Image (cartoon, coloured by chain):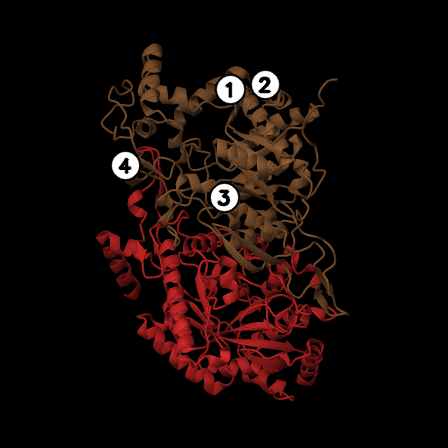
Amino acid sequence: MSKPIKQVHLAAHFPGVNNTTVWSDPRSGSHIEFKSFVEFAAAAERGKFDFLFLAEGLRLREQNDKIYDLDVVGRPDTFTVLAALAAVTEHLGLTGTINSTFNEPYEVARQFASLDQLSAGRAAWNVVTSWDAFTGENFRRGGFLAQDQRYARAKSFLDAARELFDSWPADEVVADKDSGVFVRDGLPGPVSYHDAHFDIEGQFTVPRSPQGRPVIFQAGDSEEGREFAASTADAIFSRHGTLEAGQAFFSDIKGRLAKYGRRPEDLLVLPAATFVVADTDAEAIELAAEVRRQQVSGQTAIKFAEQVWNRDLSSYDPDGPVPEIDPLEGEHTIARGRASVRMYTDRLATAREWREIGAQHKLSLRDVVVHTTARQNFVGSPTTVAHTINDYVQADASDGFILVPHITPSGLDHFVDTVVPILQDLGVHRSEYTGTTLRDHLGLPVPEREGREDAQVAS
Amino acid sequence: MSTTHDAPEALDAETTPTENPARQLHLAVALDGAGWHPAAWREPTAQPELLFTADYWIDQARTAERGLLDFVTIEDSLGLQSTDPLGPDGRNDQVRGRLDAVLTAARIAPVTSHIGLVPTATVTHTEPFHVSKGIATLDYVSTGRAGWRAQLSASPAHAEHFGRRTIDGFDPADLASPEVLALIDDLFDEAADFAEVVRRLWDSWEDDAEIRDAATGRFVDRDKLHYIDFASRHFSVRGPSIVPRPPQGQPLVTALAHVTSAYRFAARSADVIFVTPFDTTQVGSILDEVRSEITAAGRKTSQVRIFADLVVFLDSDAATATERKARLDALDGTEYRSDALIFTGSAAELADLLAAWQAAGLDGFRLRPGAVPHDLDAITDDLVPELQRRGLFRENYLADTLRGHLGLPRPQNRYAATSSTTTAALEATTAQGVSA
């Protein structure tokens, strides 16, 4: 029996504060003004996407003890932008990345439950953790977590938030004018959550929202992160965009679900994906190479190399060879507020690899950085890109993709206008929204209220 | 309030048309639930089943905008509504539950065009970094119409929702006891630090920090981004903000104040202060006290607008309004009382009162509608035209920003002014040019 054809889930990542975003392009607009978000969301909704995705960072990045100024800097508040976008969209899901280290469950649960009410069921929360004292300097709680504590705290945070989301029965608000009963129980939303991280006692203030709880995303890729996602998340935002890596990740994650009593379809795997679409494959390949060089200027190449070498390389020529000097081992000190530096676990090996690539292909440092860091996931004509995306999904490399354009805010337009119709013709992407909530779009049921009896309140 | 009113005399008193903003008053409405009377949700025209939907709040903001009001405030708190200051009261016959006010304001912003949006955000258990970027972003999504009502929480129940510290509750009747005063002073001191951090973060980007200089590859001029390096016994915050300086430079900060420690906090921190006089004499004495606190805080009284809060029940005549309130009181089982004066009467009578209090020195009024939609509609449809006839209220919006509605200029950036002698010299030149 052949496998049933899967639907491709598509989402749109608002361009972020890294070098993927090409701000120097003449078409590049504001990353802050609301009209950019309106235009971007409109394109996603025109393409019948599942949701829009916002990342977050709570401290401006620094390198060499200075604010990093080569990429887009600054972004608006996630919750506030999503609530405003609810006013100018009708179906699009609204996914916000919110940190569990520098927030409190009561407040974040109020904000997400409110967003779900104000958007009539379109809210999602990408739960991320951080541990760095650098970001902590912006917060009164200050402090930070031991790295091995961050998932424990995140798990507690999410457990507490779930208890808050579940605290009001769906029929708590009666609002019967004649009898004068507004809420069934005079003490609605009771919450009692106590563990090593949180002590929460009292009443939640937001009635149960249309989705029951917002959709929960998880983005970590470590062993702990994967287990965390398998146990609690509705979707995972991964970075494994190639076919083989995607299939390996997909099967690993889906294989972890059974021990939590969950089915494969209860957790969607949605990698981030960059793309370049042009009229022909040849033009797209050429354009993609051009974009990669825009993304990695000579200065940017030096900064990337510094993140591997963990030392000041400002005296090196990006058009010269890869530095012969060895990276500094030990604690990473050159770049702060940047999670990606953790990828370079063996700096000496990475440096060696870069030198080999440079020598073998006669590439400059900048070319090596372009070669190793910036390749787009999908490059080609609309037909090629549509079929490749569909093939990946049908081959279980993912359940769909969170597309990351490199131009704000118009970077999605061409994809929506040319690739989406082909996916629709293939019968793997909706032509009209068939539901109203994000859970509807993702095929996820409204969750039961966990561990609570929905029986009538004893009088 | 008098039950008879000589309307023609009031009209005669103002025969010249209105285009004198200096003598016009400012009007805001305070949105909360189904209105401020706890039984308002049971009124025939109330829609309590819609309280937790976006459209309910949009409709109210649009009604206020139709009335050309300066702004709406949106109440909020980090716990359930209650008649008991120490915690939940267990009553199920009043509105319980509330959406986050900042997000509600953000949801309203794109579908309104002129009305200012002033959500409440609590300072006691929250992060100034988050509140600062939330209100800055509200200013972006509303293109310059954002404000913030800074509110502290002395509730032991709210503290238990966070579990980070214990707050001993107090009965308002014990307001004079030294322990209670010390607690309140401490909370207001923390609130002032909080507001200072929020304001510094708003200024932590100079207006022209984003340069997009292709030649040098720099997106920002990092010399125009500033660490705020705030440290006090309450907390420390490094900065800069992740959000560039908002359209108004400094969104409007507001605070409700009833006692000296609150006046002191508001005088240090707020652009608009809501006070609660019960008669003209109190208007004078409160204004004297607040203005002396403003001066003591090193600010100019011309930089601050002082509004009186009033709960209003508006009908064709005082008897009808009084009867309506009495009916609601009976439904609730208690006579509704408030920290602010409760007005029952006609729009013309309210206009008389507002005019008299404005003459006593107030800049404006924040009206708390007793019941929505009834009293909110009456503010827009009856009170505003009455004030316009007297030349006391604008005929059209004359500005696009909230600060603009209130005649408050866009402030200089504190960091830009001190970080560059060139900028300072330029400002001096400009100032001379203006005064010449």
Say above or below: A226 vs B343: above
Q: In which quarter of the image is the C terminus of chain B?
A: bottom left
Label 3 Cα crowd, 10 Å radius (few <14 / some 14-19 / many 20+): many
First in sequence, mark 2 or 3: give its number. 3
Say above or below: A113 vs B74: above
Chain A colour?
brown
Same chain for marks 1 and 4? yes
Q: Mark 3 points at which residue?
A: A154
Can you tell which of label 4 and label 3 is closer to the viewer? 3
Q: Where is residue A103 in the image (x, y as percent from the top left)?
A: 47, 50
Q: Mark 2 points at which residue?
A: A384
Q: Residue A64 carries which label?
A: 4
First in sequence, mark 1 or 4: give its number. 4
Tell me the CA gap for discs 1 and 4: 36 Å
Q: What element carries label 3?
A: helix
Q: Is mark 4 on a helix, strand or loop?
A: loop
* Label pair 1/3, CB-CB below 8 angstroms: no
Q: The residue under label 2 is which amino acid type?
A: Thr
To which chain does the residue with label 1 belong?
A: A
To which chain does the residue with label 4 belong?
A: A
Q: Position of residue B421 (x, y in %)?
A: 22, 53
Q: The residue under label 4 is which amino acid type?
A: Asn
Tell me the CA gap for discs 2 and 4: 42 Å
Q: The residue under label 3 is which amino acid type?
A: Ala
* Label pair 1/4, CB-CB below 8 angstroms: no
Residue A129 visible at all: no
